[in-house]
Amino acid sequence: MRPNSSISNFKEFILRLLLPSIFILAIICLMLNYIFERNIIIKSENSGAYKVNRVLNGKNQFEIPIFGSSRALNSYIPDSISKYAFNYGLNGAQDDIWLFFLKKELAKTRTSPIIINFDFNGLDSAKGDLQYYLYNSNDAEVRKIVGDDWQPYFNVPMVKYFGRVESYITDYLKEKTELTRITNRGASLYKLVQSPKAFAAILKERRENGEVFRNSIQLRNELFRVLKEPRNREIYFVIAPYNKTYIESQKNVNDAKSFLNELRTIPRVTVFDYSEFDLPDEDFFNTSHVNYKGAQIFSAELRRRFLATADSASFKLN
Amino acid sequence: MVFNSFEFLVFFIVATIGYYLLVPKLRWLFLLAASCFFYMFFKPVYILILGFTIVVDYYVGLFLEQQQDLTKKKFILFASIIVNVGVLCIFKYFNFINENISGLLHYIGISNPIPFLKIILPIGLSFHTFQAMSYTIEVYRGNQKAEKHFGYYALYVMFYPQLVAGPIERPQHILHQLHENHSFSFENMRRGISLILFGLVKKVVIADRLAFYVDDVYHHIGEMSFIPTLLAVFFFSIQIYCDFSGYSDIALGTARCMGIDLMQNFNYPYRATSIADFWRRWHISLSTWFRDYLYFPLGGSRVTTIVTIRNVLIVFVISGIWHGASWTFVVWGLLHAIFQVTELVRNKYLPWFRLQNKFLAQTFIFLLVSVTWIFFRASNFKQALQVFKNLFAVKIDLHLTEITANKGPYNLVLCFGALLLLYVMQNIPTNIYKTNTITSWVCACLLLIILGKNNAAQFIYFQF
């Protein structure tokens, strides 16, 4: 083939195929991005992306935020705690993330209490699924959390959600259909129960692999620095219930309890330890997460405790 | 670097543009450098192993061509096969063999003094070893002239689109193409990019979606009941097809963009009406390799029935062990051999005894093949036997968490959607894609963005 023919082939390919395809794809992606963000992401309160956005931009003066990992997500029913409560629990995210949320929260001009669910595996770092951060990926601090996982295509509308579209849709559907989950102001609660065979296997695995309480020194120092700064807000550290197998298999439960005692010494910090709250196996989805029924019992008990110790105006139900 | 990654997208664009911008006589060097970079992206040090076999086989080729003495030629060919298979044995089979020796010695109360090697299998070793062996065998047979230019020979083994998981090319088909001057062609680019996009859809939208379900079921197989196990077995048959044929499509497409035509590796294998037919459609480059270099030299089917049966057994057992150093792969190969032998005997003595209806025959073969995939997918016999146990204890347990393999109902719906998508993709006539290229490209990209799984999962066949 002559070079001229090669060049005309190239021109033809670019002008007739590649550019029109890219152009059409770009238009569709822009449209989809607009529809998707406004109708799916921002419409699902239990979605991590919604929560990150709410922490950054939320304006409700009376809000009582509940921070934590998946245990927070699955254990606290805001409706049963207070009409101002909102569950910011993130599946797979660990203490560095709720610490980031806490700092953002303390920078706001609110006076409402803050609830933090504390896990017995100690202070650890894990950002969870990247889907939580993509919607706000232009925010410098959010981008810092994404860190090395940052990809250049995160700047491209809609393409940035590649591979994660289903997780946003799943969150949306969970809220709209409540087929597998009961959702309530950020909370996402296990509606389903495990089969007895599966639950027995979970217990067996837990017995064989007990958790170890282990604090990251860096996170511990950062947490104490934040907590010791002067503030006008009460912070409640709550340990949501664990299945007794979890506690029995925990290698150093006393270290966890000592850490809680350390937290108790900080002014305006209260610790409610429900780790050994008496719940039967039927109220658990697995050894570290209660199901909907367990969450109902626990949330009601927590509210009773708050009413007895805290400002009752914040814990109105209606 | 896996094909379904952002890094590969950038690499592909740079490699293709660079290829066409260079003067033809330098293209081999550029492609070789690109292939080295591609391979070294996995684990750089393993390029030395590849380099060693390339050097050995290059000189073996030259020697075989010059040598007139048949005995010497045979000896050199044999030595080269020993070197190639030896490398494969050290890296792929040493620990497996040692483990079995340990087991046997333990049985008679002796501890094994041979230490285990702490090595990771070089990626694509089985593929490029077979490709290198096909070169020396073809030169020995006189079907291919020895390649004088070391660079072109190295590129024949290392050509990046097919380096890590085939198709296992023949020198007669590919070497002359590497020498040719390929000008930019509209049709090659159109066809190439279409193949890449369709391969990606097969891998990222279909195979990875099904893998999400299958992996969980196999991981928790002891806790699973009939329905999820059955679905996992069925899904895996589709997963492995989409995973591997998706890879092959991307390989073919990438090469096609540079004007190079690689051999077809799949031809609708689940439309096969017999096991022999299945192997004419599945991983064609490997099955024809075994046919040409093992089955025919053993006598093929032009011998007595007993010897033919022996030949089939040898080929399939070796094919099984080629896939992986595990007894489960041997059983997988053996099952295919048994099915093929059964067909062979039936064709000879009871030719009327067959399913006349094409759809029923296809379904039957699909079921047989799916059963064999259980051994292919299972990490050990215990897991495989548990799969059969779950399948035979036909106990319908309607726990939603179990049926959905803890991945939620939406994922299960998407799994079935993926199957429907595959059906639609394979049943749209080719000319529709050709006349609606822009539409099909945009649709493929949207499918990838909206339904793709973003775990950059490795292709199943990369482990071989």
Image: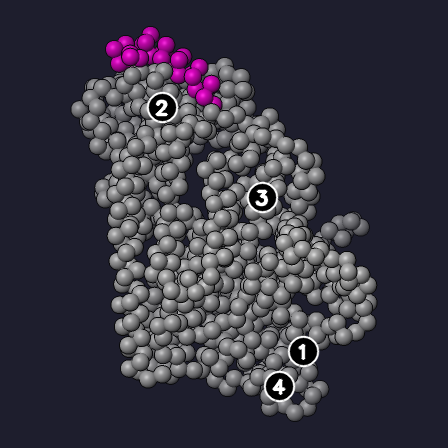
Q: Give the quadrant of residue A134.
A: top left
Task: Report the quarter where the C terminus of chain B lies.
Answer: bottom right
Determine the main secondary structure of the stretch shown in magenta.
helix
For discs 4 and 1, the disc positioned in front in the rendered view: 4
The disc label shown at residue A184, or none: 2
Q: Rounded to the nearest whole Å, what is the CA distance between mark 3 and mark 2?
A: 33 Å
Figure check: B55 above or below A164: below
Residue highlighted by disc 4: B142
Query: On what subunit does the disc labeled 3 rest?
Result: B
Circle 1 sits in a helix, a strand or a loop, which is it?
Answer: helix
Say which amino acid is labelled 2: Asn
Residue B25 screen position, x and y as percent? 38, 83
State which region is magenta. Answer: A291-318
| Residue A315 magenta-highlighted | yes
Residue highlighted by disc 3: B232
Figure check: A116 above or below B243: above
Q: Are marks 1 and 2 on the same chain?
A: no
Find out whether the residues at labels 1 and 2 contact each other: C-beta distance under 8 Å: no
Q: Which residue is at the front of the view, A42 or B25?
A: A42
Residue highlighted by disc 1: B78
Q: Rounded to the nearest whole Å, what is the CA distance between mark 4 and mark 3?
A: 48 Å
